[in-house]
Image (tube, rainbow, N blue to C red):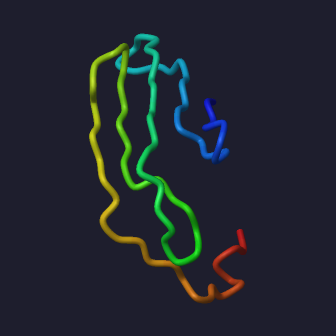
Amino acid sequence: LVFDEQSGFLIKSELVRQFEKKQVVQEDFFSDFRDISGFKRPVKLQSFRNGKKILDAELIEVRYFEKLDPSVFKP
């Protein structure tokens, strides 16, 4: 995990994972942090597997529940 020194936000994660029966290095980069409903969130995400870009995404909408029924958390 890599955090921005000034903001403390997570800007990169890296892990080795299994993909199509091979071990690959996956890197995820988080950027363009914005205040959304009182929470700072990354709006842009880029993901790479073994250096090859597999995802370029941008968050366009966030909706939070005001309240959840406690039964949602029962096993």
Considering only vertical position in the picture, is 32 above or below 73?
above
Considering only vertical position in the picture, is 67 above or below 43?
below
In front here: 65 or 6?
6
Whole-percent x, y for residue 69 in the image: 65, 88
In front here: 34 or 17?
34
Whole-percent x, y for residue 53 in the image: 27, 26
> What residue is drawn where x is 67% and y is 45%?
8
In front here: 21 or 31?
31
**Left or right: where does residue 67 sit relative to residue 48?**
right
**Left or right: where does residue 20 sit relative to residue 39?**
left
Whole-percent x, y for residue 54 in the image: 27, 30
> What residue is drawn where x is 71% and y is 84%?
70
Q: Quadrant of the C terminus?
A: bottom right
Whole-percent x, y for residue 1 in the image: 63, 30
> What residue is drawn where x is 69% and y is 74%?
73
Considering only vertical position in the picture, is 63 above or below 47?
below
> What residue is drawn where x is 51% and y is 59%?
41
Instruction: Please identify the quarter of the rendering in which residue 51 is found.
Output: top left
